[in-house]
Each structure stands twice: as structure tokens, then as C-alpha cells.
């Protein structure tokens, strides 16, 4: 499915490598470590009087530690992998008239969104896909955020806020040619906990905004004129920096969907639990149960063990058996 819906060469390669099994190979490797840990634990539990030296408790801790690090690594690369393979849900937000739709069109290289000098031009959400280097952005141009009495605009603002909540990435647009207002401050707080790039737009005009508000609150910011095609590259560079996609290596194993990520997170939680239990002297059979549960989560990920939820998801995403 990822190959069919891919938009860039990099994305296709990455999806292909996933199919090739870079991820299953990595998961099998981690599971191998856990299975050997579990086997030793089981042997110690079942034959406490025999001297079983295959794995010492030091090695056991080390194995659990390695599995933990490997899973953390996979999970931390999830966002980047998804930006390349599945595409990152990106909301373009800002108060009215700052140039959101102009920016959307600049990224797409076509006149997709309506641009006018009237505040509150965009009402419905305009969605389109843009490829920025290795990253695929599922862009949404949204209504300018302000409190309005206009019934239609109000609906647009609500939709914009909802879309932003569910977005993984935000392009927060500000207008340098006007002093910042309360509405700009609200945008800053709305995107506070999101991966985000601040765009200081209309840099071609006389500047009247106090840039400090943005400098203090954003790690990634860029000054551009969305009307000037020469500034597109500058914008793309900062987006790639924020998404960390520039150095993305499609041959490295990546998690590409939320289900895979949640399996890894579940396994990681169990491994950390097992490590703590070992430290605290919990009985080995209890530790073994926890390690086995981590193994199960990883088998669910690779499809070697199918839980009801996986089967349900597969039936909901593919038209099989209908
Ligand atoms: N000089 C200058 N004008 C710009 C720039 N970007 C946008 N504009 C103008 O600003 C006005 C508003 O642009 P839009 O892209 O419609 O702004 P918006 O944020 O989508 O506005 P709403 O949809 O109303 O929220 C238009 O007249 C644009 O031509 C820029 O970088 N420089
Ligand atoms: Mg607009």
C-alpha cells in the first residue's frame, strides 16, 4: 500500500526496502536476543538445581539492555520514516491574511488555494501533497485563526483548529509587515507542543513586527517572501531540517505505521519492566512472563502472531473477504 501511494523516488525506495524486509530483519534480530534471554530464564526456573551456564545473569541484563536500545532507536526514527514513507500531516496555520495560501501555492508550484487581499479568504481546508526533498507533506491550507461573528468563517476556524490538533507537523505563518497581535500569540501557544517551523512572511515589505516573540519560541524559523519563488529553497531546507529527512537512509529499517510503533512501544515497556524486576529481585518466572510478552508484541508486529486487533485492521484496510 505504501508503494502504491508513494510520491517520490525516495519514498518508493524506502517502502520497497520495508517490503524487502529491513524491518522484519531488525525485529527478528531483537527477538532473537529476547528469545535467548527467555530460554535461559525458563531453564533456570525449571531446573534450579542444575548448573546452567549458557547465559549468566550479567549477560541476561546486557541482552535486555541491547534489545531496549535497539527498540528505542527504531521508535525515535519513526517520525522521520513516516515523513518519507507515509507522508507527514502538515497544517499551515496563522491569523488571517498572513500569506498561508500563498505559501501553500509556493510549495505546490501551482495556484491551488485562492489568494486575495481580503482577510478570511480561505474557509474550507484545502488539502494537497507536496514533495520536499525526501519528505512528503500532506499539506492542509486552513482558515486564518481569529474570533469571528461570520457563521461560515467560524466553521472554517473550528475546522482549522481540529486539523491542527491531529497534525504531526505545523507551518506557523506570521506577517512581518504588521505588528504582532494577540492572535499571533495564540498561534504560538497552539503550536507549542508540535513539531513546527515558524515562517516570517512578507520579508519584502517594510518590517513592523517584533520578531522576538518568534525567536524566543521557535527552534526552526525562516524569513521569506511567499511571493518570491527564489525563497522556496530556503523554506524547503528548514522543513527538511525540522523533519530530519535530509540524511534519511532508506536502506535502514524503519517503522512506518502507528501499529508497528505501538507494538515496539509495548515490547519496550515490557523489557524495561523486566529489567527493573530483575534489579528488584522479583522471581525469575515472573520476569520470564514479562520477557515473553515483549516477544509476543514483536511477533505481532511481523505478523508471525496475529492478534484480533491486527486481523481487524487488515480487514478494515484491504477489501478482502468482502
Ligand atoms: N508583499 C507580499 N505580499 C504577500 C506575501 N505573501 C502573501 N502576500 C499577500 O497577502 C495577501 C493575503 O495572502 P493569502 O495567501 O491569501 O493569505 P492567507 O493567510 O491565506 O489569508 P486567509 O485565507 O484570509 O486567512 C494577498 O494579497 C497576498 O498577495 C509576501 O510574501 N509579500
Ligand atoms: Mg488563505
Image (cartoon, rainbow, N blue to C red):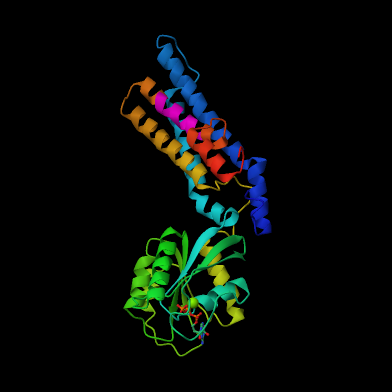
Q: Which is more toward the observer, 118 or 38?
A: 118
Q: Residue at x 40, y 12 (%)?
A: 48
Q: Tell me residue 101's x, y (percent).
A: 52, 76
Number of numbered discs on residues: 0
In magenta, the rendered stretch is 289-298
Q: Is residue 4 left or right of residue 199?
A: right
Does residue 297 appear in the picture of this structure?
A: yes
User: Does residue 263 sit above or below 92 in this rendering?
Assistant: above
Q: Tell me residue 214's x, y (percent).
A: 39, 74
Q: Tell me residue 138's x, y (percent).
A: 55, 62
Q: Which is more toward the observer, 19 or 4?
A: 4
Q: Is residue 26 left or right of residue 214?
A: right
Q: Residue at x 46, y 42 (%)?
A: 262
Q: Quadrant of residue 97?
A: bottom left
Which corner quadrant holds the C terminus? top right
Q: Is residue 313 left or right of residue 251?
A: left
Q: Tell me residue 131's x, y (percent).
A: 61, 64
Instruction: Please tell me whether residue 293 belongs to the stretch shown in magenta.
Output: yes
User: Does residue 136 sit above or below 234 in this rendering?
Assistant: above
Amino acid at each position: 500500500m505504501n508503494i502504491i501511494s508513494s510520491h517520490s523516488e525516495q519514498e518508493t525506495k524506502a517502502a520497497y526496502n520495508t517490503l524487502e524486509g529491513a524491518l522484519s530483519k531488525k525485529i527478528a534480530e531483537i527477538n532473537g536476543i529476547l528469545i535467548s534471554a527467555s530460554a535461559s530464564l525458563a531453564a533456570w526456573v525449571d531446573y534450579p538445581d542444575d548448573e546452567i551456564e549458557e547465559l549468566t545473569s550479567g549477560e541476561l541484563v546486557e541482552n535486555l539492555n541491547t534489545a531496549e536500545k535497539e527498540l528505542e532507536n527504531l521508535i525515535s526514527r519513526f517520525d522521520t520514516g513516516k515523513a518519507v514513507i507515509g507522508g507527514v500531516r502538515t497544517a499551515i496555520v496563522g491569523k488571517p491574511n498572513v500569506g498561508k495560501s500563498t505559501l501553500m501555492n509556493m510549495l505546490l508550484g501551482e495556484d491551488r488555494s485562492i489568494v486575495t487581499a481580503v482577510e478570511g479568504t480561505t474557509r474550507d481546508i484545502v488539502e494537497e501533497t507536496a514533495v520536499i526533498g525526501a519528505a512528503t507533506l500532506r499539506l492542509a491550507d486552513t482558515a486564518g485563526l481569529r474570533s469571528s461573528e461570520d457563521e461560515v468563517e467560524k466553521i472554517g476556524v473550528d475546522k482549522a483548529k481540529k486539523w491542527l490538533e491531529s497534525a504531526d507537523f505545523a507551518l506557523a505563518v506570521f506577517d512581518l509587515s504588521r505588528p504582532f497581535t494577540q492572535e499571533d500569540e495564540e498561534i504560538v501557544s497552539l503550536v507549542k507542543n508540535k513539531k513546527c517551523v515558524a515562517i516570517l512572511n512578507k520579508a519584502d515589505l517594510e518590517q513592523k513586527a517584533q520578531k522576538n516573540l518568534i525567536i524566543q519560541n521557535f527552534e526552526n524559523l525562516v524569513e521569506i517572501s511567499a511571493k518570491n519563488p527564489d525563497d522556496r529553497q530556503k523554506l524547503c531546507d528548514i522543513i527538511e531540517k525540522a523533519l530530519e529527512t535530509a540524511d534519511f537512509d532508506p536502506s535502514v529499517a524503519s517503522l512506518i505505521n502507528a501499529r508497528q510503533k505501538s507494538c515496539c512501544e509495548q515490547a519496550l515497556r515490557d523489557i524495561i519492566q523486566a529489567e527493573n524486576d530483575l534489579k528488584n529481585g522479583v522471581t525469575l518466572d515472573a520476569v520470564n512472563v514479562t520477557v515473553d510478552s515483549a516477544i509476543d508484541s514483536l511477533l505481532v508486529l511481523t505478523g508471525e502472531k496475529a492478534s484480533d486487533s491486527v486481523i481487524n485492521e487488515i480487514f478494515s484496510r484491504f477489501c478482502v473477504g468482502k
